[in-house]
Amino acid sequence: MQTRSSPSVSSLHSLAREAGMSSFTDTPKPILYRRLKENYNLNRLQRAHKRGLKRRVDDDMCDFDADLGASSSSSSSSYPDESSPRAMRHAGRSARHDNELEPWDERRGDPDDSRSRKRSRESSKGKGRAGERSRTPPRKAAAKSGYSKPRDAGTKLVDPIMLTELPPGALTFEFQRPNGTGVVYHLNSLIDYFLATGDFTEPETRIEFSDADLKRIDEIAAASQLGKSSVLAAKLNPTRFNDAKLDRDAIVGLERCAGELVADMLKVIESNDPEEGQMRLIMYLFPLFSDLHRQLRTADAEYSSRCMDHFAAYVNGPPNRPTVDKFGFLPIVLSFFRQVRGS
């Protein structure tokens, strides 16, 4: 890259001569280029050298015109038509020499000009962003399901909890987030979510519902005669959900332990030692997994069924990169999953 972006050796010698350097003729090109760039202002040297070349070309042109005028006055057999081509050839050689000094000027321009253009673009871009921010309303339009916006005739909202469309005239509650956006929930599913989980945070962002929000939910539910328990009273009585949280933590712990065993099974499937893998599956992994699955199914049968689906998909691998089974362990593990699930 340095050879492409740096001037030629002859140009670097000219710049070194312009800078007053000594014993530069035997210096390698990369070292000379680095010295000019670090110890001298390379851009200034190039501009000064370019101005000097232009001055010399102008002086040569003036001398050439004077000589041409003197020769034409003394003899009519001179070549008046050759003056312009000779001058053009002379200027062309100088222009090629200038382009050789700065090969990147045609693409990037002068560094100072490029920096000024960059600053102008940034300032105009910043103004554009500021204008866009000033035109953007404080509450963003609802691009996702459940976000509130001015409802037109064809506008349809989806409950973020049940992921079902809110029917016309359904009892809803709009939760205002700190950033100004509003999310519309079906009131029945929101109250059931609070009372079933004991988690009084928004399901999407985990932003906690304030006591004022919960009180407003109770007031709307009481006015509509939904027959639901008070969510504010449930929040103020945390011991009510101690048993449920303990059971949930125990189920999640069982699922994580079983998941570690499934990861070990996948390592056995992809290993290069079939004898060691067979002994590990039969004597260690399969018995432990059977016991953990039995406890998980006893605590929550539906949750254990979803876990088994996930385990089977994990062992099979994604469609674009399935699991590499060198020794035929994959069908054995999947058959074991089916037996455990059906027992």
Image (tube, grey):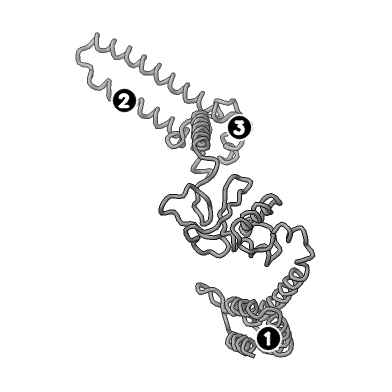
Amino acid type, label 3: Ser
Q: Percent position (x, y) of residue 199?
A: 70, 61
Amino acid type, label 2: Met
Of marks 3 and 1, which one's residue comes earlier in the chain?
3
Within 10 angstroms of label 3, few (less than 14), some, or many (20 or more) residues? few
Picture residue at 56% right of the left edge, 56% below the top: 172
Is residue 251 found left or right of 28 in the rendered image? right
Mark 3 sits on what residue? 23
Given residues 7 and 318, the one toward you in this image is: 318
Quadrant of the frame with the C terminus: bottom right
Within 10 angstroms of label 2, few (less than 14), some, or many (20 or more) residues? few
Is residue 146 found left or right of 63 in the rendered image? right
Question: Which SS class for mark 2?
Answer: helix
The answer to whether one can see residue 308 in this image is yes
Whether residues under marks 3 and 1 lie with C-beta atoms below 8 angstroms apart, the answer is no
Q: Nearer the viewer, mark 2 or mark 1?
A: 1
Amino acid type, label 1: Gly
Picture residue at 62% right of the left edge, 80% below the top: 305
Mark 1 sits on what residue? 277
Given residues 295 and 214, the one toward you in this image is: 214
Mark 2 to mark 1: distance in Å?
Answer: 84 Å
Mark 2 sits on what residue? 88
Mark 3 to mark 1: distance in Å?
Answer: 72 Å
* 159 w.r.t. 179: above or below: below
Whether residues under marks 2 and 1 lie with C-beta atoms below 8 angstroms apart, the answer is no
The answer to whether one can see residue 9 in this image is no
